[in-house]
C-alpha cells in the first residue's frame, strides 16, 4: 500500500479519486464537484488554481481550510510504484525509417533506432562538431498517470537531420516525492550552458505549477553526470515561469517570466549558478493569454531579439518578437514573427529555442514544440481561445458567448495532455530589415540557407 498525499495543490482528479477527499472537497466547496468532475480539461487543474479562476468569488480562507483538511487525511492507494510506470504506446512504438536528408516540420520525428524523439521544451548545444539536442523525456506521460517528465534525454547528430539517442543525461529521482527531479515534479524546459570561468556545464530546469521554482545542476561534461546545486530556487523571491539563458562573452543573462506579470532580465553570477542582479523588465503587467511564455533570446547584427508565445498552456497561440540594443537593455515589441500564418497560432507550435548554426552564414534555426498535434488550431479557434481566456480577467473588454466559454473548458491542458506523442516544428529564421521572420516550409534543407 502506498501513502497518498493530497493538498489544495493536488489535481482535482486525484482529489475526486477517494471518498474521503471528495467529502472534504464538498464540505469546503459545495456544488463545485458536480460542475467540474466530468470536464476532462478541468480535471488536471489544482483546487487552488480552480479557485483562482473564480475571480475572487471564493475566499482565500476557504482554500486554506481545504488545504489543511486534505493534508490531514491518511489515504492509501493500491497503485503500483511510480518507478514501474510503463512507456506509453507512442513512447514504445518503433518504426524503422530511412535516413533523413531534410527537416519536415510537424511530422513525427524518430531517432536512428526508430523511436519518437523525446526532447520536448528543449534546445541544441553544439560542441566539437557535434550537435546535442536535449529536452524533457515524455515517453511515459500519457495525461492519465502522474508522470510529468521522466528525466532529461539527449540526442547527438552531425547533420541536424538524423539523431542518435544518448539516453537520459539527467535521471529521474525516486528517492522522495518532494525531490526536485521526481517524475511528478513538473520539471520543464532544461537549458544547458557552458561557463567559461569554471569550465563547468550548468543546467537550469524550471518547475511549473504550484512550485514555480528552479532546479540548477552542474556537470564536468555535457552528458553529465549532473549534480543538483540549487533546488526550490526562486530568484529574488519571484514565482518562476518560462525562461531562457543567453551567454555574451563571460556573462550570462536569465530572461524569466516572473509571477506571470512580466519578463525580467537577471544577470547570473560568474559561475552561472545563481541570479545576482535584477536589471530590467519587458512585457510588464499583462494577464493571460497575453503574458509571455516560451521565451527565447538571440543576437543578430549587433541587436538582441526575444521571441515569446502567449499563455494558453499546451494549446498554441500567436507569438511576438521584440528587440533590444544589448542583452541587458529592455526589449521592445516589433510584432508577430510568423509570416502568412493562417492558423494565427504560430504554425500550431510554441517556440523553445533560436539556435545559430555554427559555420553557416546567418542561419538561425527556430525549434518549436507541437504539444497537442491532435488538437489543431485555426484562426477562428485561436480568436475564441484568446477572448475566452482574456474574459476571465477583463470581462468588460473581452466578450464571449456561453458556447465560446465552453470551448475553453474542452481544450487539452497541462496535466491531461498525452505529450508522449508531441511533435516538433523546426523552421529557419530570417531577418528582413532587422525584423525576425519565420516562413512555413513543408520540408527544407540546411544547404538551402547556408
Image (spheres, rainbow, N blue to C red):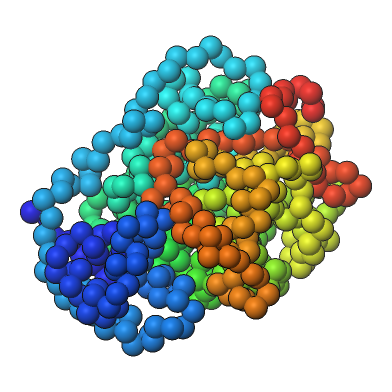
Quadrant showing the N terminus: bottom left
The residue most toward the top is 98
| Residue 132 in picture, x, y percent from top left | 55, 34
- Whether residue 22 sits left or right of residue 190 in the image: it is left
| Residue 299 in picture, x, y percent from top left | 77, 50
The correct choice, above or below, for 244 with respect to 105 in the image is below
Q: Which residue sits at x=33%, y=39%?
A: 140
| Residue 435 in picture, x, y percent from top left | 85, 50
Residue 274 visible to an observer of this rendering = no
Q: Which residue sits at x=41%, y=38%?
A: 420
Residue 28 visible to an observer of this rendering = yes
Residue in the foreground of this view, choosing between 448 and 440: 440
Q: Which residue sits at x=56%, y=14%?
A: 99
The correct choice, above or below, for 243 with respect to 110 in the image is below
The correct choice, above or below, for 112 with respect to 325 in the image is above
Quadrant showing the C terminus: top right
Amino acid at each position: 500500500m502506498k501513502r497518498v498525499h493530497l493538498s489544495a495543490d493536488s489535481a482535482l482528479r486525484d482529489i475526486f479519486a477517494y471518498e474521503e477527499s471528495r467529502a472534504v472537497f464538498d464540505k469546503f466547496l459545495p456544488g463545485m464537484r458536480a460542475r467540474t468532475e466530468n470536464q476532462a480539461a478541468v480535471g488536471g487543474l489544482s483546487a487552488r488554481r480552480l479557485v483562482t479562476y473564480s475571480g475572487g468569488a471564493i475566499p482565500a480562507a476557504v482554500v486554506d481550510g481545504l488545504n489543511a483538511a486534505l493534508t490531514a487525511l491518511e489515504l492509501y492507494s493500491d497503485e503500483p510504484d511510480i518507478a514501474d510506470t510503463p512507456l506509453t504506446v507512442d513512447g514504445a512504438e518503433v518504426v524503422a525509417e530511412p535516413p533523413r536528408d531534410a527537416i519536415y516540420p510537424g511530422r513525427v520525428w524518430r531517432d536512428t533506432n526508430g523511436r519518437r524523439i523525446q526532447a520536448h521544451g528543449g534546445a541544441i548545444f553544439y560542441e566539437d562538431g557535434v550537435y546535442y539536442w536535449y529536452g524533457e523525456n515524455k515517453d511515459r506521460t500519457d495525461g492519465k498517470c502522474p508522470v510529468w517528465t521522466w528525466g532529461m534525454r539527449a540526442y547527438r547528430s552531425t547533420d541536424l537531420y538524423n539523431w542518435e539517442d544518448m539516453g537520459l543525461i539527467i535521471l529521474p529521482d525516486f528517492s522522495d516525492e518532494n525531490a526536485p527531479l521526481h517524475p511528478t515534479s513538473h520539471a520543464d524546459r532544461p537549458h544547458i550552458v557552458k561557463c567559461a570561468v569554471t569550465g563547468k556545464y550548468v543546467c537550469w530546469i524550471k518547475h511549473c505549477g504550484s512550485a514555480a521554482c528552479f532546479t540548477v545542476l552542474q556537470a564536468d561534461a555535457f552528458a553529465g553526470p549532473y549534480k543538483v546545486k540549487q533546488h526550490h530556487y526562486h530568484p529574488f523571491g519571484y514565482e518562476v515561469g518560462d525562461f531562457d539563458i543567453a551567454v555574451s562573452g563571460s556573462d550570462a543573462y536569465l530572461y524569466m517570466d516572473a509571477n506571470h506579470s512580466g519578463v525580467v532580465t537577471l544577470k547570473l553570477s560568474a559561475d552561472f549558478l545563481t541570479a545576482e542582479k535584477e536589471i530590467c523588465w519587458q512585457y510588464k503587467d499583462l494577464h493571460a493569454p497575453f503574458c509571455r511564455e516560451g521565451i527565447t533570446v538571440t543576437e543578430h547584427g549587433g541587436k538582441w531579439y526575444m521571441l515569446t508565445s502567449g499563455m494558453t498552456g499546451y494549446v498554441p497561440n500567436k507569438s511576438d518578437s521584440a528587440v533590444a540594443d544589448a542583452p541587458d537593455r529592455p526589449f521592445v515589441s516589433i510584432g508577430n514573427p510568423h509570416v502568412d500564418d493562417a492558423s494565427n497560432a504560430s504554425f500550431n507550435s510554441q517556440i523553445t529555442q533560436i539556435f545559430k548554426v555554427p559555420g553557416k552564414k546567418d542561419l538561425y534555426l527556430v525549434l518549436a514544440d507541437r504539444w497537442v498535434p491532435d488538437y489543431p488550431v485555426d484562426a477562428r479557434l485561436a480568436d475564441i481561445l484568446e477572448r475566452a481566456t482574456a474574459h476571465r480577467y477583463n470581462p468588460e473588454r473581452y466578450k464571449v458567448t456561453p458556447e465560446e466559454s465552453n470551448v475553453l473548458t474542452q481544450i487539452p491542458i497541462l496535466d491531461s495532455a498525452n505529450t508522449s506523442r508531441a511533435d516538433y516544428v523546426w523552421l529557419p529564421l530570417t531577418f528582413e530589415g532587422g525584423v525576425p521572420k519565420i516562413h512555413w516550409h513543408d520540408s527544407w534543407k540546411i544547404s538551402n540557407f547556408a
